[in-house]
Amino acid sequence: MFEGATTEQALAVLAAAHRVVQQVLDPADPRSGRGDGVVVAAGRLLFTPEVFVDPKALPRIEPQDLGKAIGANRDLAEHAAALIACAGLADGVIEPTRLRLVVEYAHAMHVSDGWVRDVLQVARGHLAWAMADMTRRNASNFPGFANPDDTLAPMMPYETQTDDDKRLAERFLVLEGLPKNTYGHQFWAHFRKHGFDFPGQPNAFTGVWAVPHDGLHVLSGYSTSIQGELLVSAFTGGMHRRDALRAQILPTIFEWHVGQEVNGIGKQQGALDPVKFLISWQRGEAATTDVLSPQWDFFDVVARDLEELRWTYGITPLMPAHAAAGTEINVDATADPYAN
């Protein structure tokens, strides 16, 4: 993620990230301290060679000094600003002063992506506006989901189940007959295990969202727990890259770690584990195929061996220690835990 960064640049980025985290820990909040957890994990995981730091020993760095340290390296600047933003929310608290400092660091590095404006709006107290913008940007990442006027297509469009809907559902139901090692069969098993309706069935989410999203659960190995949803979103942002923070990463941090409603699914707290989060983001960036590309076709690869497809796509193995924790989302009435 920070390829080519010097040790001095790494320390400057980590010092800035430390400055925007919560300095006085709250023993009653298990999220407290995770900001510096991101700082420590980032030094160890994202830089080559590794940088081991004691956050409290890092020097105070002003935005203009960080800008000078980063220089003209745009990729480094964008990654640095993104890391600082995530560190500023990792303690689970929306603190306007720290979020304004996140924006100052971004501006000092000449990073003006849309997420910077959203963070500034949150700092100004315009949380609902920022959440709505993130929701629209998330939809626009999925080809065919967002309309040209920036409105959303129906999330569940198959209630009447037309003949076209039935034919669409049948394309997914026949995946059961593929060999168990194939991507298509494991996609089928993922839906059956959790009791999800397939696109085309009455209670299903729209296929233009569900196929790439749940397909990435299968490809990445992340579960459907709340932490798994945060991790698959970080993976997706790293893989797709375009508008990663605004569309994928920040919305899930706000909803499932900070505890702010974003899209009606339901707010939760505490899902961000620093090491798991950074590894999921890094795994996504290492992927060589973007399944959110309009050119990617799910049915073109359903017969491929899942492990071979992961290798082809550059998806590194998920170590057990880095897998998502927590109870998975299931539709209890229709879930089949024995599907495989």
Image (cartoon, grey):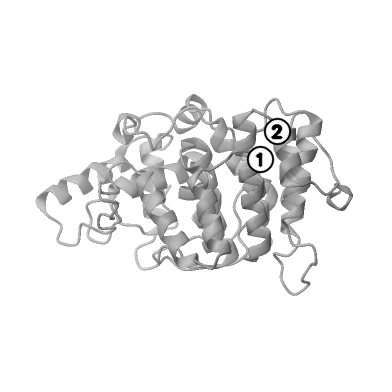
Residue 213 in view of the camera = yes
> In the visual, does 276 lie left or right of 69?
left
Among all residues in the image, which is located at the extreme left?
A: 163
Q: Is residue 334 above or below residue 85?
A: below
The kind of secondary structure element at disc 2 is: helix
**Closer to the camera: disc 2 or disc 1?**
2
Residue 302: image location, x then y, percent: 34, 33
Name the amino acid type tagged 2: Ile
Point out the image quarter for the N terminus. Answer: top right
Looking at this rendering, what residue extends furthest in the bottom direction? 28
x, y percentage for residue 69?
A: 75, 34
What residue is drawn where x is 28% and y is 55%?
151
Looking at the picture, how far across and down is residue 292, in whole percent?
Answer: 39, 38
Question: Mark 1 belongs to which amino acid?
Answer: Ala
Q: Nearer the viewer, residue 302 or 133?
A: 133
Which residue appears farthest toward the front when viewing the image? 64
Taking the spot 65% from the left edge, 50% from the top edge, the residue there is 104
Q: Which residue lies under the disc numbered 1?
A: 80
- Left or right: 161 with respect to 189? left
Label 2 sits on residue: 70
Q: Of 72 and 78, which appears nearest the observer? A: 72
Find numbered disc 1 in the image and state the secondary structure of the residue it sits on.
helix
Residue at left offset 49%, top offset 31%: 310
Q: Circles 2 and 1: CB distance less than 8 Å?
A: yes
Q: Residue 24: horizontal and vertical position, in percent?
A: 80, 67
Q: Earlier in the sequence, mark 2 or mark 1?
A: 2
- Nearer to me, 321 or 133: 133
**In the depicted structure, whether residue 95 falls above or below residue 232:** below
Q: Is residue 233 above or below residue 271?
A: above
Mark 2 neighbour density, 10 Å: few (under 14) some (14–19) many (20 or more): many
